[in-house]
Image (cartoon, coloured by chain):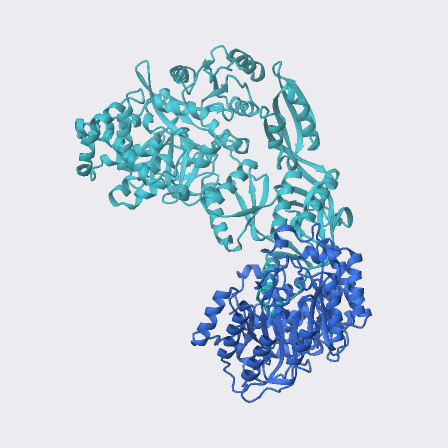
């Protein structure tokens, strides 16, 4: 499992600390009997990690992601598995056979999913992502929800989110969806400037953005998120400031701010190079990030994850299952599930996906894996938890993966505490000072006992999360 | 060495009957190969001799066509018979030097023609042929009176045609038949032939009839580079005369001068030869004048020749007999033989090439090497013609080899004197020196796993190269390697190249450095070639550096730029002489450290290739030298430290910091990169911090791609060396070391 360490002479060199075997005890540590410990039904809602005896990943999922891939057209930055319907079908896609056929296959997939769990907690979160899920007629959404409900059960107060794009829904449609149980809207606004929307190839303009905000408000959606993209081509500081101001004014309970990623096989990918004009420079886009962090914090949003802000209690529960490495179902084209420690991504092409569902029905697909790679698991935990403001909870990490790796993690981050990128917190979430740390670091046992959490600072640590997380990876997989 | 053997040879090696036979081409090709079957080898060689003893060289092609079918048919019958030896010999020679990687199919295609030749001889009378060749062979081994022995070497500048002339002499005397002739016969190593230089010596015994009397001519080849001037002096000491070969269009070059002076010091009869007179640009009269003026050598009987065209070769041979004095007949005295070369043979141990000065040496004698004090039994003695032919005895004046299962060349160094164990000579021959390395560099395997291989390779090379010194060195950046000492820059380059080529190692070499002498405050003197081992400034009273005298010969147009170059390199002007109207000689004293970089390249490029140079070590001189340290984020980076003259510290420091700034990836914080003398920062750059490196979104919880990216990033960090908390990629070190070579 662990790579053998490099030739012995290398290790004697004065180079980075290369932990030799940080995972001495194999998987045994986190294979505690699950059966003894039936999952508590509402643990996810409290945003707490589960009891330490049960490894999180072994729990039966109580979240489901449903991919609804339809879009009117592909945005220029998007490399996601989507199915573009064309501009002719704006709001009246109700009878588009492409949608109904897909929903049919999707339902077959949900029904054919076997779960291997003795007990099923009812679903606590469902997330309709896309694509543009709001293009799917509510009647078809209802079918999907019914299928999920009958297959897994659904908590009464389950969070049911749906990504909705301006211009793809009206009040009637939203009301209908709300009637089906959708209670959280993720509104894909992206920008408040006509030229930016156009440059991104969005299918809507600023007018539709304002309309959509209006509709969401008028329909009484209590929990909704405004989704923005920063660092768009030709985006200026003024534009970004304006977007943030208008966002705050619209009073969403949640804001997602995604820093634009230039993906290879997209139109942007062929047009632009990251950090080069017309994209903002690296420094500029770091400023955008910092500005969002500052402005939204001033407006009482908590920066609870790298790209996510929310009012108190309005964190996206569904997304949070990701950050705490909890299992979740996933259904639909190209979607990725995480069950029993295994991640599985469905085919990204409709035809392949259809075949996959066929195979699933014939019992030919089995994601059960005997072994979960401990190092990979630890990497997932670190990578995901460090995205959150809560950070990595060292105690449970230590229990799952052993003390040596926990200690090494603390040590590798020591310089970055001094540079202000990483914070160490005690068990009561009080920040440990540099002086305190320099005492702790002398004694491994003290170090692992006294440190409760490791978190990245906001915004500097978050901004360099890749660098910082890859440092941790280096420690975990020498 | 065996690794570089041509493909075709090893191909034949695999087959049983041919396997033995293919030793022959090996013999011709690589001196350092094992000759497992001397009789077969000799026979094959002699057969060839016989075949080609009648010049001109390209005589029997017409036979080929006529006898092709016959030979093809015969081939099957003949295969087990030694005749096939010749086939392979011929094959080898046909493919000649350049294209060693010839593949099997090509050899096959060729073999028809070659075979027909072999068969041609065969068809006459196999037994006859064999007999005649044996006679010929015996002939060459026949003793001649001492007064009929002539020992000589050839002095020439690179490219003035020394090797071509040597080839021609071997051909004309029938020592090597023209068909076996590879170009530059005596340059055995691939590397030698490629670079057109002679690294190790060769010798050849020739038989020449002059006025109906047989003469034995021993050509002792000399290495053509200043790095090996000690070897040159020893081989000159083994001769009574020398041919001074000068390119009739180029004129006298610096190196020629140095070697002629060496020859004159050794009281050699120098015969001036103007080569390449067939070339349109040849001006033999001007060059003759130049030789007379510069060297003060009487050129009234200079020989005009073109080795390439075969003009004047006979005249040269005649002059050798007429003008070079025979050796003294001192066979009655106790044995004293001068070693002028030795090499390591993987199967037989060290083979020593020597000239008997006094006495005689016989097979089976117990011999003593006077300088090393080691004694051995001479298992085999013989002459070089130019391949080894065994004889029973060698007399004063003769040149030959000894094989005595000697373990390392260090036991039988060049310049050492061989004497009899039981009847020791009273005094050893003068002039013995142990090679002292002048230039040092660190050699590190790029792949740390190759460290043991590097050590083995160096040990093997050292068996054959007593001047090569090495000791293990550890560097925090480069890992484990060796600090190696070399005679000079060429020696260094050659060793590096052989390590890479013949031992398949990938190496990083640090900037070459010289040995400094540090006078410490406590009165001690420390020799130091490694900047990281330089004593603390507080403990140093003064630092001395090696100084060389450098003589450059250049067309007058480039005097200015060469003076500029030398001045830049802290050269101290000594003398300028016009040797002709258009050419001048410049003499400077210069720190060796300034020369070990790219000085020679610069000299060549600034003079459009026309200038030549020659240097000799003249001693140590106190100099204002300082250790220049590089600090990355305030942490010292030992492997990047260098010793430089104070005046150059600023420019070197600037170049280093700038290069590092380019090469070190940006970090999460601002990183100062500084060059310092002691605590004083003399050059500084700063690497700005990365501002943003964040992935926005885990779409639908699909983290696999993101994780892959982060893993890649983590792997990238692993390939770097941590200097404090800064990750520096290996390439940065390599680039800086390369830069150091350039700017220092």
Residue drawn at point x = 80 percent, y = 73 percent: A300
Q: Residue at x 54, y 34 (%)?
A: B227
**Which chain is cyan in the rendering?**
B
The percent position of residue A226, horizontal first and vertical second, equals 72, 69
Give percent across and percent down for residue B63.
23, 24
Position of B440 relative to B588 (above/below) = below
Left or right of residue B739, residue B463 in this image: left
Residue A413 can be seen in this image: yes
The mark total stands at 0
Q: Does residue B373 appear in the picture of this structure?
A: no
User: Is B63 positioned to the left or the right of A467 in the image?
Assistant: left
Q: Nearer the viewer, residue B256 or B450?
A: B450
The quadrant the C terminus of chain B occupies is top right
Q: Quadrant of residue B255?
A: top right
Give percent across and percent down for residue B403.
37, 39
Percent position of residue A187, x then y: 70, 69
Chain A: drawing colour: blue
Q: Looking at the rendering, in which quadrant would you find the N terminus of chain B?
A: top left
Return the residue nearer the eye: B620 or A201. Answer: A201
């Amino acid at each position: 499992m662990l790579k053998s360490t490099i030739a012995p002479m290398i290790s004697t060199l004065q180079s980075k600390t290369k932990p030799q075997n940080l995972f001495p005890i194999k998987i045994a540590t986190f294979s505690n009997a699950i059966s003894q410990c039936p999952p508590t039904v509402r643990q996810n809602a409290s945003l707490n990690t589960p009891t330490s005896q049960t490894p999180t990943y072994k729990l039966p999922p109580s979240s489901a992601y449903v991919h609804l891939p339809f879009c009117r057209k592909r945005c220029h930055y998007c490399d996601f598995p989507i199915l573009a319907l064309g501009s002719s079908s704006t709001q009246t896609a109700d009878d588009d056979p492409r949608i109904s056929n897909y929903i049919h296959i999707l339902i077959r997939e949900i029904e054919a999913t076997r779960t291997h769990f003795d007990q099923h907690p009812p679903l606590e979160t469902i997330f309709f992502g896309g694509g543009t899920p709001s293009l799917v007629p509510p009647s078809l959404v209802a079918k999907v929800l019914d299928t999920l409900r009958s297959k897994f059960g659904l908590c009464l107060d389950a969070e049911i989110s749906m990504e909705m794009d301006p211009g793809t829904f009206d009040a009637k449609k939203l009301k209908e969806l709300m009637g089906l149980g959708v209670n959280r809207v993720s509104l894909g606004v992206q920008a408040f400037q006509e030229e930016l929307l156009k440059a991104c190839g969005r299918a809507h303009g600023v007018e539709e953005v304002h309309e959509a905000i209006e509709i969401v408000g008028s329909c009484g959606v209590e929990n909704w998120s405004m989704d923005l993209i920063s660092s768009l081509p030709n985006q200026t500081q003024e534009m970004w400031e304006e977007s943030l101001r208008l966002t705050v004014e619209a009073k969403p309970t949640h804001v997602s701010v995604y820093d634009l990623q230039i993906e290879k096989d997209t139109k942007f990918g062929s047009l632009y190079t990251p950090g080069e004009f017309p994209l903002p420079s690296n420094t500029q886009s770091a400023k955008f990030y910092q500005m969002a962090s500052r402005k939204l914090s001033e407006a009482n949003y908590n920066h609870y994850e790298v790209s996510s802000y929310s009012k108190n209690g309005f964190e996206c529960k569904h997304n949070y299952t990701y950050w705490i490495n909890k299992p979740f179902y996933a259904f639909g084209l190209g979607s990725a599930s995480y069950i029993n420690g295994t991640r599985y991504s469905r085919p990204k092409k409709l035809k392949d996906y259809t075949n996959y569902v066929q195979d699933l029905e014939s019992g030919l697909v089995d994601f059960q894996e005997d072994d979960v790679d401990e190092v990979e698991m630890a990497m997932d935990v670190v990578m995901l938890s460090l995205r959150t403001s809560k950070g990595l909870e060292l105690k449970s990490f230590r229990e799952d993966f052993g003390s040596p790796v926990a200690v090494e993690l603390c040590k590798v981050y020591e310089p970055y505490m001094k540079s202000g990128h990483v914070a160490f917190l005690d068990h009561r979430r009080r920040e440990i000072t540099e002086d305190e740390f320099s005492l702790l670091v002398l004694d491994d046992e003290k170090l692992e006992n006294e440190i409760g959490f490791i978190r990245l600072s906001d915004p500097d640590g978050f901004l360099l999360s890749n660098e910082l997380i890859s440092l941790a990876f280096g420690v975990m997989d020498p | 060495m065996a690794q570089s053997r041509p493909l075709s040879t090893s191909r034949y090696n695999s087959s049983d009957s041919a396997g033995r036979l293919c030793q022959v081409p090996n013999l011709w090709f690589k001196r350092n190969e094992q000759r497992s079957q001397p009789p077969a080898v000799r026979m094959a060689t002699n057969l060839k001799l016989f075949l080609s003893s009648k010049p001109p060289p390209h005589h029997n092609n017409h036979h080929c066509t006529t006898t092709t079918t016959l030979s093809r048919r015969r081939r099957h019958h003949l295969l087990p018979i030694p005749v096939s030896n010749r086939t392979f010999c011929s094959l080898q020679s046909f493919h000649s030097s350049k294209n060693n990687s010839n593949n099997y199919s090509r050899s096959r295609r060729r073999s028809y023609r070659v075979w027909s030749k072999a068969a041609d001889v065969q068809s006459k009378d196999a037994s006859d042929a064999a007999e005649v060749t044996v006679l010929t062979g015996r002939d060459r081994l026949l003793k001649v009176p001492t007064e009929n022995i002539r020992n000589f070497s050839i002095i020439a500048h690179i490219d003035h045609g020394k090797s071509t002339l040597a080839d021609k002499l071997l051909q004309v005397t029938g020592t090597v038949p023209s068909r076996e002739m590879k170009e530059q016969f005596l340059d055995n190593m691939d590397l030698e032939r490629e670079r057109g230089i002679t690294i190790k010596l060769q010798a050849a015994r020739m038989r020449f009839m002059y006025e109906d009397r047989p003469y034995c001519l021993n050509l002792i080849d000399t290495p053509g580079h200043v790095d090996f001037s000690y070897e040159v002096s020893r081989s000159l000491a083994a001769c009574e005369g020398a041919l001074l070969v000068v390119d009739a269009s180029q004129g006298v070059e610096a190196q020629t001068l140095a070697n002629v002076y060496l020859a004159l010091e050794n009281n050699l009869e120098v015969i001036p030869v103007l080569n390449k007179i067939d070339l349109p640009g040849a001006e033999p009269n001007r060059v003759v004048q130049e030789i007379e003026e510069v060297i003060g050598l009487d050129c009234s009987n200079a020989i005009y020749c073109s080795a390439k065209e075969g003009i004047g070769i006979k005249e040269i041979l005649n002059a050798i007999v007429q003008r070079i004095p025979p050796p003294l007949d001192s066979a009655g005295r106790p044995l004293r033989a001068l070693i002028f070369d030795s090499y390591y043979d993987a199967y037989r141990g060290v083979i020593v090439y020597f000239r008997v000065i006094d006495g005689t040496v016989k097979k089976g004698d117990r011999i003593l090497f006077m300088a090393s004090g080691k004694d051995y039994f001479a298992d085999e003695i013989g002459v070089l013609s130019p391949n080894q032919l065994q004889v029973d005895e060698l007399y004063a004046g003769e040149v030959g080899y000894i094989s005595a299962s000697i373990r390392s060349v260090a036991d039988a160094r060049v310049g050492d004197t061989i004497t009899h164990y039981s009847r020791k000579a009273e005094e050893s021959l003068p002039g013995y020196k142990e090679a002292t390395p002048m230039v040092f560099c660190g050699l590190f395997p790029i792949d740390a796993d190759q460290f043991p291989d590097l050590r083995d390779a160096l040990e093997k090379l050292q068996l054959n190269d007593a001047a090569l010194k090495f000791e293990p060195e550890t560097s925090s950046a480069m890992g484990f390697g060796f600090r190696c000492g070399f005679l000079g820059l060429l020696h260094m380059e050659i060793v590096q190249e052989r390590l890479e080529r013949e031992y398949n190692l990938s190496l990083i070499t640090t900037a070459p450095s010289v040995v400094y002498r540090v006078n410490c405050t406590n009165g001690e003197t420390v020799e130091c070639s490694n900047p990281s081992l330089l004593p603390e400034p507080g403990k140093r009273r003064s630092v001395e550096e090696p100084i060389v005298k450098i003589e450059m010969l250049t067309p007058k147009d480039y005097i200015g730029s060469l003076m500029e170059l030398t001045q830049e390199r802290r050269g101290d002007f000594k003398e300028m002489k016009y040797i002709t109207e258009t050419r001048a000689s410049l003499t400077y004293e210069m720190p060796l450290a300034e020369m070990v970089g790219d000085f020679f390249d610069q000299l060549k490029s600034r003079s459009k290739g026309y200038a030549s140079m020659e240097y000799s070590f003249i001693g140590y001189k106190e100099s204002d030298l300082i250790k220049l340290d590089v600090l990355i984020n305030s942490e010292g980076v030992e492997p990047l430290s260098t010793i430089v003259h104070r005046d150059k510290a600023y420019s070197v420091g600037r170049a280093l910091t700038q290069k590092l700034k380019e090469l070190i990836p940006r970090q999460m914080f601002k990183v100062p990169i500084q060059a310092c003398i002691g605590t004083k920062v003399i050059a500084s750059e700063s690497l700005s911090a990365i501002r943003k490196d964040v992935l926005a979104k885990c779409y639908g919880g699909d983290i696999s791609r993101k994780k892959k990216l982060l893993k890649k990033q983590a792997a990238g960090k692993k390939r770097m060396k941590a200097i404090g908390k800064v990750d520096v990629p290996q390439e940065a070190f390599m680039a800086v070391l390369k830069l150091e070579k350039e700017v220092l």
